[in-house]
Amino acid sequence: MRFMYAPALGRFVRSVHFEGDEPVPQQELTADASLWAFAYLGMFAADDPRMVATMQAVQTSLTVAAEHSGVARFDGDTYQLRQTAVDLGVPGNPGRCARSGWRKYHLLTAETPADLEYPLQLIEQVAAAALPSGALAEQIDPASGEPGPARRR
């Protein structure tokens, strides 16, 4: 884990890759919504300053500010990305799994009943986006709210 933190960025990195016999790995600097799992899995306390800074960077980099907002999986995510998302200039489609992780992180950091209001809003947003069957699309189109890549008929 010592290589997973980038002091120059003040946050954790997405991954590390060792090349050949080099003793120091290359760091993948892409902001990734799955970094919340470091706190969830108990690797770091949710209130560890490095974890807090990482999640602030994730929020800044991956928040999809569109009619159908959310959190992208990672910066530059093109999986199921529609032209409307490109036109909106968002980092990727809002993902329900990414939003679920964001909710879990905020639950870990909650100290008062008021701190539970934001995670509850996230739960309500995810529930509102459920298909009639109750299933949740992994990602949605940020402009239309349609599940990606399927289109409702």
Image: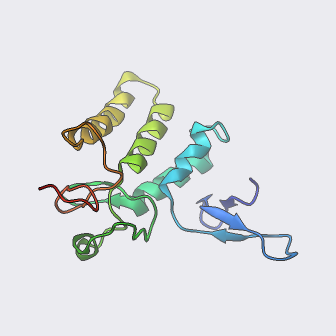
In the rendered view, tell whether residue 84 sits above or below residue 144.
Answer: below
**In the figure, is residue 17 to the left or right of 78?**
right
In the rendered view, tell whether residue 88 sits above or below residue 100.
Answer: below
Whether residue 145 appears in this view of the structure is yes
| Residue at 31%, 60% in the rendered image | 64
Judged from this view, the residue extending furthest toward the left is: 153
> Which of the pair 5/89 is nearer the observer?
89
**In the figure, is residue 38 to the left or right of 58?**
right
Residue 3, picture quadrant = bottom right
In the rendered view, tell whether residue 136 sits above or below residue 108.
Answer: below
Q: How is the image coloured?
A: rainbow
- Locate residue 40, reporting x and y percent: 57, 38
| Residue at 53%, 46% in the rendered image | 36
| Residue at 34%, 66% in the rendered image | 80
Residue 84, picture quadrant = bottom left
The quarter in which the C terminus is drawn is bottom left
- Locate residue 46, reporting x and y percent: 57, 39
> Which of the pair 74/133 is nearer the observer?
133
| Residue at 45%, 67% in the rendered image | 75
**In the figure, is residue 36 to the left or right of 59?**
right
User: How many circles with numbers are drawn on the protein?
Assistant: 0
In the rendered view, tell whether residue 121 sits above or below residue 66.
Answer: above
Whether residue 48 appears in this view of the structure is no
- Locate residue 71, reporting x and y percent: 36, 54
Judged from this view, the residue extending furthest toward the top is: 113
- Locate residue 61, reporting x and y percent: 42, 63
**In the figure, is residue 74 to the left or right of 87?**
right
